[in-house]
Every structure is written in structure tokens, then in C-alpha cells.
Amino acid sequence: MDSVCSTHRYAELKRGADVVREAAAAALDLGFPELAVEWLEQGRSIVWGELLQLRSSYEQLSSAHPDHARRLRDLSAALDDAGATREKSLSTFSESTHGATHGATQTLQQEADRHRMLAIERDKLLQEIRRLPGFERFLLSKEFSQLRALAHSGPVVILNAAEHRCDALIVLADVDHVIHVPLPGFDFQWAARLQNTLRALLGYTRITRFDDRKGKLSIGGGGSWESLLSTLWNGVVKPVLDALAFSTLGDLSRIFWCPTGLFVFLPIHAAGLYGTQYTSPGHKHLAAICASFLSLSHPPTANSTFKV
């Protein structure tokens, strides 16, 4: 059952991530970029919190209020179990060649009722936890003002890829609003094509290893890497650098890229016009990839190990 629950949980996380990206795009359509940032960060924190097993909020709750933490853990596990069981029953029911039976229908209804009751009970417990001192925003999205403060080491650029639009959202510590950079020259279909191109190039060039001493990939063969990286430069990175007005060597800064969706699979940090005489200082910006604002607020320590 554990493997079934895990598979169900990851499937739900993927569906949830897709919904969050589309919701953020809708917020941008309506002119609410700060809301889009809040939603994207909450969605990404949930996903990475699950995948990397970061449980800082739960750990704080467990330390201060162990009984509430235990109840929440048990209810969450029960919800996972109920969701996986119900999904399996629905699959079996839909594949049945004998049609719906009264017993099967009744079982599905009972499982749905149990899932709904558990969800209501968990929501009530969360409301109870949020009445505790210091836990008023437990498992809620951070407000934009809180996220902005985490950009103290350099601009944070969230890249959102939705079905009908792609955008960059720039967060600066000293600016009280999001700098919204639409990417009209780069759409979802382009991102998908570049992902396929990258996959083909990686297979063709036969990447063998990462040389820690030289800080670069050891590869063989060839391919149109320049074309891929220049497309990313012109369609994504340059519009962001232009919005940040990086025009002199003194403007060079560390940029934290937070990609979502198909952007996750593209080498944004390596984008540039290689093989040309182009020497814009922005081309040499110091880039870093972060999973979310969560990783900026909880930097890895000597005792922490992250495996993706």
C-alpha cells in the first residue's frame, strides 16, 4: 500500500503543479502579478517539500505542539490512503465489463464519503493549529512582502510556462511590486520543442560525467547547442536582463532563477550567444537555480544533503 500511496501522491502533486501554473497565468491575465508569485511559491513549496522531504513547518509544530503534529500526521496519512484506495476502485470500476452493480456503486460512495469526512476533519485541525501562537499562517502561502525580503542576495526570477502564455516574474528586495516581463517570443510549444531538442542533443553528445575539478560537463560528439542556447537567450534571458536594466559591468549581479513547468528542463543558466562576438555584460551574469523561495529561506548547511 505504501508504494500505491506514493504513486498516488506524486500523481496528485503533478496535477496540482499544472493547476497552479495555469492559475498563475490567469492571475497575470487579470493584472495581479503579486498574487501569481504567491500562488506559484506555495505550489512549488508543496511539491519540493514532498519530493525533498523538507518538513520545517511540521518540525516546528512537532517541537512546540507534539499532539497537534501527531494528529495532523495521522490524518494526512489517512487521506493519502483513502485517496489511493478510491482511485484504485474507480479504475477497477471503469474497466469492469459487467457494468455498474449496486454493491460496487455503494462501495465507491462509501469511500468518497470517508475521503470527504477526513478532509473536513483535517481542515478543522488546521484551523485549530492556526489559532496557536506563532502558527497563524501554518501551511498557508507566504505573503508577497515576506517573499520579497528573501531576495536580499539578488533578483529572483520566476519563470512560468502555461498553455497560453509564458512569463518572467522578477522579485527584488527593495521594490514593493513584481516586475512582470511577458515573454511573447517564447511560448509553451517553443518550450516543448526545445526540451525535445535538448533530449536529442544529450543523447547525441553522449554526456559522460561532470568534472567537479573543472566545473563543466565532459561530452563527445556535437550538435546545435549554440542554436538552443541562443533561443533561450533571445526569448527568455535577454528580456529579463533588459527589464533589470543591466547595461554596465558594475550592474552584474547574481540572479536566482526559479523555473516552473517545462522551464525546469531547460538550461536557462547557460543561455547565451556562443560562437559570436557578442559581449554584453548581461551575458556573463552569475546565475543560480533555486527550487523556490523555500530554498532561499533555508539554505543548505554542512549537515544537509539534497538529492533530486
Image (tube, rainbow, N blue to C red):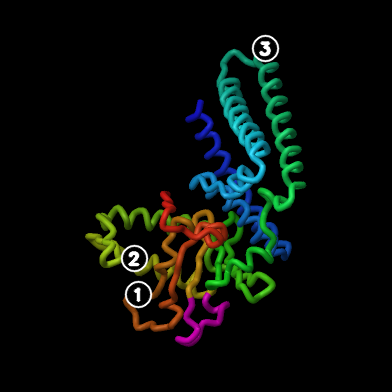
Q: Residue furthest front?
A: 64
Q: Which residue is mark 2?
A: 225
Residue 146: x percent and y percent? Answer: 66, 64
| Residue type for callout 3 | Gly
The region drawn magenta spans 241-253
| Residue type for callout 1 | Tyr
Residues at badges 3 and 2 in contact (C-beta under 8 Å)?
Answer: no
The mark nearer the N terminus, 3 or 2, is 3
Crowding around mark 3 (Cα neighbors within 10 Å: few <14, some 14 to 19, many 20+) is few
Measure the alpha-carbon separation of dots 3 and 2.
Answer: 59 Å
Q: Which mark is residue 99?
A: none
Q: Which residue is mark 3?
A: 103
Q: Is residue 143 left or right of residue 16?
A: right
Q: Secondary structure at mark 3?
A: helix
Q: Quadrant of residue 106?
A: top right
Residue 90: x percent and y percent? Answer: 61, 25
Q: Residue at x 23, y 60 (%)?
A: 221
Q: Residue at x 37, y 57 (%)?
A: 198
